[in-house]
Every structure is written in C-alpha cells, then in structure tokens.
Image: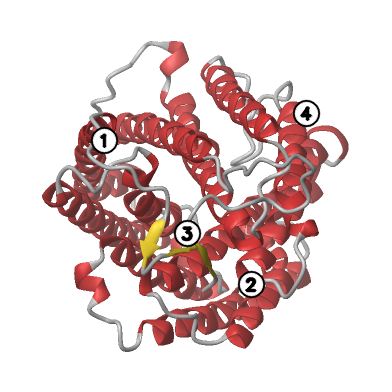
Amino acid sequence: MTTIAAGPPRVAGLDRAESLPLVNERVVLCYFVASFTFFIIALLAGLAYSLTFLQSYPFAGIEWLSPGRVRMLHTNGLAYGFIANAFLGGLHWAVPRLTLRSVLSDKLSWLIFVVWQLIVLSTAVGLLAGEAQAVEWGETPVWIDPVAVLGLLLVGANMLTPVIRFKGPMYVSLWYFIAALVWTALTYTMGNFFPQYWIGGTASGAIIGLFIHDLVGLFVTPIGWGLMYYFVPIILKKPIWSHGLSLVGFWGLAFFYPLNGIHHFLYTPIPMFLQHGAILATIAVELVVTTVIVNFFATLRGSGDALRTNLPIRWFYVGMVFYFTTCLQCAFQVTLTFQRIIHFSDWVVGHAHLVMFGVFGFWILGMMTYLFPRLVGASGWYSAKLNSWHFWLSAIGMLVMVLDLTMAGLVQGFAWDALMIWEETLRASTPFWLVRTYAGGAMILAQFLFLYNMVKTASMGRNGAAVSGGIVSGGKIDV
C-alpha cells in the first residue's frame, strides 16, 4: 500500500505551477449516481419481466413495453448503465492514486460522462422501439455502436495516459486495468459489427458466444478484480498476500477466458473440437480463479473480524465467494453431461444473476458504501442500520433467487428429458417463478433503502457535517 503526505498532491509532468487535485471526486460521484439510477431502472424492468411468468405482466398490450423489449432493457441497463458507469467511477478514483498522476483531461472525463449517459439512454429508447440487434448482450441499435466504440477509445486514452507516464513497477491493479481498456474496445467491435455485417450462420454463433463471454471476462472481470486488488489492501491496511499469485491469476485470465465463448453453444453445428476446447478452457478458468480466491483469503488471515465490522469488506468477500461458486458451477455445467439436462433451463438464468449481481453488483455496492460519504463530504453514513438492511436483503435475496432458479432448472431439465407434456412443465415451474419474483422484490427493496440512505447522507454533507477528501490515517493519506 502506497502512502503520500497529507495535503493536495502535485501532478508530475505539468508545466503550470499550481497544484491540482489528484482525483476529480465530482466525476466519481456523478458516475456513481448515474450507475445507481440505471441500476434501479434495470431492476424494476427485471421485476416487471418476471411477472410475465406469473401471468401478471403490468404492461400487456403496450408494444414499446412488451416483455421481450423490457427484458433487453433489464440486461443492457445492468451491463452498460449500472456496471460500466460504476467501473468508470472506480477507475477515476483508483488509477490516479496508483500512478500518482491525474487522468489525461478533466474536460475529457466530463465529455465521456455525458456521452456515455446519452449512449445508455439512446440504447434504452432504441431497444424499446424495437431496433435491437440479434446479438445477446449486444442488442444496442446499429446507429449507437460507432459512438460506443469511440467512447471506449476515449476512455482508454484518458486512463492509459497516467499509466504510460508512470515510472516504476506497477501494482497488479494496473495490469488488469490496462488489459481491460484494450480488450473492451476490441470485444465490443467484434461482437457488434462482425455478426451484423460480415459473418453469418454458425460462424456468427461462434463469434456471438465469444462476445458474450469476453464482455464478462475481458471487460467486467479484469476491472472488477483490479478494483478489488486496490480496495481490499487499502481497507485492511495490509499488502496483498502474494504479488506472484496475483500475476498467475492475471495471465491465467488472459489466456483461458477468451477460449470459453463457445460453451454457450454446446450441442450446436459448431465443430465439436471447438466445443471440447471451450469446455476444457472453462474448467481451467476455475483453477485460475482458485488462485485468486486463495490470495484474497490469505490476505484476510488475521483480519477476519473485518467481515463483521467492516461492511465494504463484507460486500467484497461475499462477492468473491459468489465468484468462486459461479465459476465452480460453470466448470460442471459446461460438460456435455450437465448440458443434456440444464440446457435452456432456469439453471442458466440463476447462474447469470449470480455472476452479474452477486459478484460484480456486490463489489460495486461495496465500493459505493466505502466511498459515497467521502464523495459528498459527510463524516459517515446517515444510518448504519439501513446499510446493514441493504446488505442482508441483497445477499439473502440473491441467495434465495439462485437456489430457487437452480432447482427450477433441474426440475425443468429432467421433465423435458422425460418428455413430459410442455404444459405440465410450466405448472411445475410456476412456484419457482413466484419465489424468484419475491426474491427480486427483496433485492429491489434493499436498493431503495440504500437510495434513501444516500440522499440523507448527501444532505449531511451539504449541511457541513464534515469534509473528508481522503482516507486519513496517522497524518498520511492512503492511496
């Protein structure tokens, strides 16, 4: 963990004499606010869509709000509105502190912020208008894709500049950030342009599978783990257990994750040697993830009480357990034996919710819990009890939903395998769908409690309760 003397840091490489703040905290705050706003909207869209399965859809007969379109609003809102915004805020906080240099341009940061919100909003409108591409997680209308790629390139330029100017050995977080910033633009271009314009048929399916998994593995995962490598040592006030093991995790991710994509299309006309390769690579990723989990839990050794006393650490580590679980689950479910049962079932839906909300959502909420009072100038949270309710409703709701959908998937799979009448499988699934909706409702309630706590905490900051620009400890500011 690096420390710098308290006081406004000077930014190396600038000609003007005045000192500049290392981090523009207003940019970070705006990204977090935008992220949480889209999070609420996406969750409500998911709740509405779940009611379709209970024959209680609230927008029946309204074309713009038909279930298929609302479902895409749910998934794209989470991916590009919630996760991408939060990670951009996290990068604006962590990269300058890890390099001791500000981003390339504050004006560029604000431009990217505004343009990205317009991209997300335009995507939402386009999806509801029925202009989606036939690419899972890449349904963004074709007229948005060039702007999105340009935005990703600008993000790379803004964030990579301080990294390039940095002299000395780099902490592993920067390795993950560099890779993600390079990979993401390439992944988005591949998934949104190649199947749309140049590649069709079975080959297009292979590319789409690659895009689906690389969006998670080469964008969300490296930024998520990179932020964990930054925040966990800072909060625990101790170095990560093994720098060498962290690099094993990084290079294992880089080598195996891009080979996973075709496991989304098992039992298809895609050549079997490619399907078998994807299965082996997926199992290998679980071994890589195990090294990362061991590294973080070894770091926690001797500080285990932080799981009880420090809420951000609890968010982070529960997310890590869910990450290990989802990768272990994936290592089994990609085998052809498992696929014979769970293919197209709700098992897959539970798995997707676990990784996107249970892992990355938990890490983001942990970051917000840690940083939000600082960003609004408050001495602490308005209510620790509300934060506790937020965590437990989210965690229990997530666990119930995943277990419920996993059981639903097994019931459906074995029923289909037994050639049960289709209507009977629907009746058997209905109780599970009801539990899924209640679990989702608990998770949504948790976010509204957190929203209320955020508003009250921001009010405390505006009223001058305290001003805190960093994490102050013993006359130093931990970065």
Could you say which disc has been placed on residue 171 in the image? 2
User: What residue would you read off at disc 4?
Assistant: 146
Say which amino acid is labelled 1: Leu
Question: Distance of mark 4 from mark 2, alpha carbons?
Answer: 33 Å
Comparing 20 with 248, the one in front is: 20
Residue 327 position within the rendered picture, expressed as x and y whole percent measured from the top left? 49, 71
Residue positioned most to the left: 385
Q: Nearer the viewer, mark 4 or mark 2?
A: 2
Say which amino acid is labelled 4: Pro
Earlier-in-chain disc, 4 versus 2: 4
Residue at (48% x, 29% y) in the render: 73
Could you say which disc has been placed on residue 6 in the image? 3
Could you say which disc has been placed on residue 451 in the image? 1
Question: Distance of mark 3 from mark 4, alpha carbons?
Answer: 43 Å
Question: Distance of mark 2 from mark 3, alpha carbons?
Answer: 22 Å
Earlier-in-chain disc, 1 versus 2: 2
Residue 5 position within the rendered picture, expressed as x and y whole percent measured from the top left? 51, 63
Asked whether, in this view, residue 161 is left or right of residue 241, the answer is right
Earlier-in-chain disc, 3 versus 1: 3
Asked whether, in this view, residue 222 is left or right of residue 34, the answer is right
Image quadrant assignment for residue 437: top left
Question: Distance of mark 3 from mark 1, alpha carbons?
Answer: 32 Å
Mark 2 surroundings: few (<14), some (14-19) or many (≥20) residues within 10 A: some
Say which amino acid is labelled 2: Tyr
